[in-house]
Each structure stands twice: as C-alpha cells, then as structure tokens.
DNA sequence: TTGCGTGCAAAGGTTTTGCATGGCA
DNA sequence: TGCCATGCAAAACCTTTGCACGCAA
C-alpha cells in the first residue's frame, strides 16, 4: 500500500467523484475516459491510468485481471471497508464467458486454510476461478 | 474440449516433443519460439500460438494468466492425467513466480461448496490461485 | 488434388513512456 | 519558485489476422 500523490489536482478529484458513483461495479480505464469525454470534460488517458494505478496502491480501488485480452477491471472500495479484506472472488464460465462475483464467507475459509496449512497468502484480486456456470452445465 | 487438427505436421510434432521435456513447468509462447530459434530450426510465431491454443482445446496444455502485462503461461499435462479431474490445484507466487502443486483434501471442499451453493463447477485444470508464497511474505 | 497448416508482415488493442507545458503548494 | 501532475503522441508489448505458399492426406 503506497503513499498518496503529493498534489491534489482537479483531475484526481473528478476521478474519485466519478468512482464514488459506481461502487462495487467493474469498470475499465477506457470506461472512465469515455465517461469524461461524454461529459464534455475529457481527461488524458495517461492521467487516468496513472491515477487509477495510484488509487490501487492507496487501497481505494481493487484491480482485477480476468483474461489477457480484456482490459483490466477496477472496482471502487468504500472508505469504511478500506482496511477490510472485503474483496470478492471471481468465477468465470469457460463456455459462455459469464463473470460471477462471489462475496462468500466460506471462500474466506479457503484463504485461512491456504495460509495456515500451506503458508500461501491467496490474492483474490488476481485469482479467477474457471469452470462452468449452472446454465452451461445443463446444456452439456 | 475441441477436436484435434486434421493434419499431423512437422511443426506440431516438434512442438509436442519440446513440451514433453518441460512437464509441469510454466512456459510462454515466447519461450517456445526462442527455444526453437536457438536450436537453429525456428518455427513461425503464429504457428506456435495457433498450435498451442489448439493443444489447450485438446487438454494437452493448460493455459494460465498471471497479469495483464505478462505473457500467458502454458503448462504441459501428462497424458495419464488427461481425463482425470486432476485433483491438483496450482498456486503461483506473484513475486518469485514459484509454482506450487497442491494435492489437498480440504481444497476439494471448495469444489463441493462452489457446486452446491453457487452452482458453479470449478475446473482445477484451468484455475491458478495467485498469491504470495511463504518465503516472499517474509521478505515483505 | 483438396484444403489445412505455415509463415511473414502488419494490424489490433491495452498500457506505458518521453517530454514539454501547466498547476499545486 | 520548485516540483509534481497533466496530456499529447508515440512506443512497447503480446497476440491475432490476412494472404500467398507449401505440405499432408
């Protein structure tokens, strides 16, 4: 978890204000750029990338990698859960591509188990569980 | 799981022969290209990409994504475990890159839980659990 | 002979970087 | 004033695609 940037800029404020309107949703850097463009007040894409990467370091955003050809997803974390391990797990259907978000207590136990028994600290932000969703299982 | 390609080519044979020399290790398409280049018998990179993608479909290779800027990793699966529902889970350290194979009863519970409670059939062959290994946690 | 596989080069798309300019403290 | 942040354009990177040629069956 890195330090904040030293300066408070208009772009940074606007970016955070926007992110607060989409808590818990998955958005990409491109989404953000487009949102500002539609607003008639575009922000440079390198600024968006740099600030968002910084916000990940500050714990304000989570960053998820779903697969190599999709852009990275960012998710706004509400201030009250900044410290908490309030991250979600992702399941992706190999067949239809559907992405499922799991906020599940029991999956937290996996993390403790891996840490306690195997010394491995699981990072849910980078981990995607692949498999078949309910609908696709039925289709055979 | 898709069908095999219709033709048996020299390039495909050489590729499989090479993969058999690195079972259980994670390699990238670039690694493969370079290995053949060093051998003095290069293979076109598009051929490598196309054949490896095909081998993933055949179940001969697993494909893993670490993060968006690293190239995709492929892992050779030995023939004897092709059909098996590979009770082997993979943990990969995001820092040192170490690959850990876990054969653990308790992790089987993840699968039952996901299936029972969330209707999701986890495929351990496609799934890598990312995080930090013991040594890298200590280094901070 | 048929048509799939190969290989080169170029495109594709996301993210990063160089560098001059502008704004925060 | 001093330094950081911005923004444009271009680079970097991995991967895919178009197309002509060659090889497997």
Image (tube, coloured by chain):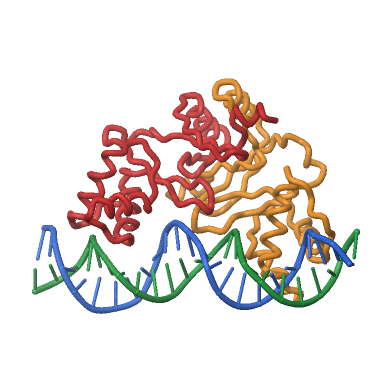
Chain colours: A red, B orange, C blue, D green
In terms of depth relative to the viewer, which is nearer, A94 or A129?
Answer: A94
* Quarter assignment of residue D10: bottom left
Give how far across and how far down residue C23 sits, in percent. 14, 62
Residue A34 located left or right of residue B91: left
Give how far across and how far down residue A48 sits, in percent. 31, 56
| A9 relative to D12, above or below | above
Q: Which quarter of the rendering shows the N terminus of chain B?
A: top right
* Quarter assignment of residue A40: bottom left
Q: Residue at x 38, y 33 (%)?
A: A86
In terms of depth relative to the viewer, which is nearer, B7 or B104?
Answer: B7
Q: Residue at x 37, y 38 (%)?
A: A25
Residue B24 located left or right of residue A62: right
Give how far across and how far down residue C25 sits, in percent. 11, 58
Q: Would residue B110 be visible to someone looking at this image?
A: no
Give how far across and how far down residue B52 sits, in percent. 70, 56
In terms of depth relative to the viewer, which is nearer, B73 or A111?
Answer: B73
Q: How many numbered discs, if any?
A: 0
| D21 relative to A32, above or below | below
Q: Would residue B11 be visible to someone looking at this image?
A: yes
Q: Residue at x 57, y 26 (%)?
A: B114
């Amino acid at each position: 978890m890195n330090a904040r940037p030293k300066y408070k800029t208009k772009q940074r404020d606007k970016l955070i204000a926007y992110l607060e309107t989409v808590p818990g949703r998955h958005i990409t850097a491109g989404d953000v750029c487009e949102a500002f463009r539609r607003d008639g007040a575009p922000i440079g894409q390198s600024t968006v990338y740099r600030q968002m990467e910084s916000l990940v370091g500050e714990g304000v955003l989570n960053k998820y990698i779903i697969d190599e050809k999709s852009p990275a997803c960012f998710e706004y974390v509400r201030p009250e859960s900044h410290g908490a391990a309030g991250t979600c797990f992702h399941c992706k259907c190999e067949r239809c591509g559907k992405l499922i978000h799991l906020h599940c207590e029991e999956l937290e136990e996996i993390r403790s188990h891996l840490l306690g028994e195997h010394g491995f600290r699981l990072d849910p932000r980078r981990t995607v569980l692949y498999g078949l969703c309910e609908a696709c299982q039925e289709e055979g």
